Image (tube, helix red, strand yellow):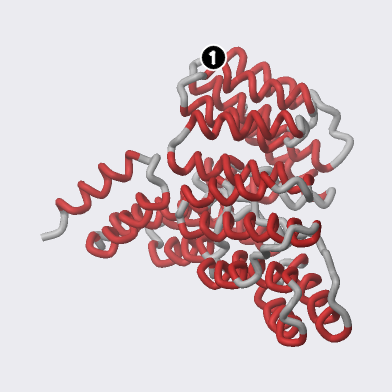
Amino acid sequence: MKRDVWKRAVLIVGIAVLLTGCGEAKRAYDKGMELAKAGKYEKSLPYFKDAIKENGEQAEYYIGYGMALCRLNRYEAAKEEFQKVIQETDNKISKENNKQICYGMAIADYGLGDYGSVAEYCDKALEIEYLDDMDCDILYTKMSAYWQQGEWKKAEEACQELLKKNKRYMDAYMALAGIEQKLGESDKAAQAYKDAIETDKTYYDAYFKLYQQYMAAGQTDAANELLDQLVAIKPNKAENMMVIGRAYFYKQEYDRAKEYLKMAYDGNNKESLYYSGALSAALEQYDDAIMYYQKYIKENKEELNVEVYYQLALVYMQQKEYDKAQSMITKGISYGITAALQELKKTQVILLEKQNCYEEAVPLAEEYIRCYPADAAMEKELAFIRTRIK
C-alpha cells in the first residue's frame, strides 16, 4: 500500500554488504542481516553483537547493528554504534562505510526529532561519490526533515533534485504535491500528481490524491472525471478490482464498492481489507470496521500500513472505548517512524483531552510540538489544554 509519503523517513535495512570479515563473525553478521531484512530486528541484535565481538574491526557489522536499533526506535544507542566506526582513511571501502554511517546518523536524528542535524548528515552522505543508488533515499530523508521543520522551499528543492536523479521515484511526486499545497501552490500540486500519472499510469494513489485536491477546491467535475477513469480500468487482476472498489467508495456507491473489494480479497489482495474497514467505518458499521481492520493487520504483517492503528483508534473513539483506542495508538507508535506517526501522536493528545486527562496531555502535546514544529494548530490546542488544568 502506498503511503502519505512526505511524512515518512526512509529507513534502510538492505544496506550495501561490503563483507571483508570471515569465519564466525561473517556467519553471525549474515544471520543478523537475514533476520533484519525479514523485519525481525530484535532477533537480529544478538547476531550483530556476536559479529562485533568476534571481529570488532569491521564497520559494516556496526552499521547493520545500528540500523536494526533504529528500526527498534533505539536511536541514541544506534548513534553510539555508528560513531564507533567513522573512518578517517580515504579508500573506497572507507568512503562507502562513511556514507552509510552518515545516513544512519541522519535516520537516528530524525527519530530523535533533531531535524537540523538530519539535513547536515544527509549532505555529508551525498558528498561521498560512492553507492549512488542510496542518493535518492538520502534526498527523500533530507526532504522529510525540512518538511517537519516547515521549511517548504528547501523541501521543494530536495524533492526536485531527487526527481532529476530518478524521475520514476514515485513517492517524490506525492511529496512534491504535498509541499506545493503547503506553499499555497495548488496548480503546482495538481501538476505534480499529473506528472506522477504521466510517468506511471498505474500509480493509482496519485489519482486518488488528485481527486481529493479537486474535491477540496470544489472542482467536482474534474474530481468525478478521475473516478470515472478508475472505475473504467480493466478488472483483470485483484489489484485493479481493489482500485475500482476504492473509486466506487469515493463515489459513494457503497454496494458496488463492497462488491469489488470482496472480489479483490477473493483474488488474494489483502490491501482490500483496509478499504473494506474504511467503508464500514463510513457507514458507521463500527464492529464490521474493527473486524476488517484487525483482519488486515493479521494478514499483512510483511507490508503493514501502520495507519490502520490510527483508523482503529478513531473507530474505538466513536464507540467511546477509550482504553482500546489508547492501546491502538500505543501499538501504532511502537512501529517508530512511519507515515502514520504524526497522526498517531496527535490523536494520542486528543484522546487524553476527551478523557479530561489534561495534565497527562500537556507533556505529550509539548513533545508533539517539538517533533512537528510546522503544526501550528497544536500550539493552540496546548494553550487550551492548559486552561483546563485547575
Residue 29 seen in the figure? yes
Residue 304 spot, x, y in % from top left: 67, 56
User: Going 56% across and 56% down the picture, which residue do you hit?
Assistant: 337
Quick one: quadrant of the C terminus? bottom left
Task: Decide: is 300 above or below 181.
Answer: below
Q: Nearer the viewer, residue 102 or 207?
A: 102
Q: Residue at x 56, y 20 (%)?
A: 214
Amino acid type at circle 1 is Gln
Few, some or many C-alpha atoms within 10 Å of disc 1 (few <14, some 14-19, many ≥20)? Answer: few
User: What residue is pinned by disc 1?
Assistant: 219
Q: Position of residue 350 (x, y in %)?
A: 34, 52
Q: Nearer the viewer, residue 232 or 376?
A: 376
| Identity of the residue furthest to the front in this view | 89
| Rendered location of residue 80, percent (x, y) | 56, 72
- Look at the numbered disc 1 and give the secondary structure of its residue: loop
* In front of the other: 139 or 348: 139
Q: Is residue 17 above or below residue 20?
A: above
Residue at the spot x=79%, y=23% of the render? 232
Image vertical order of residue 106 relative to residue 373, above or below:
below
Residue under the image location 45 percent in, 55 percent down: 113
How many callouts does the rendering have?
A: 1
Of residues 372 and 271, the one drawn nearer to the viewer in this rendering: 372
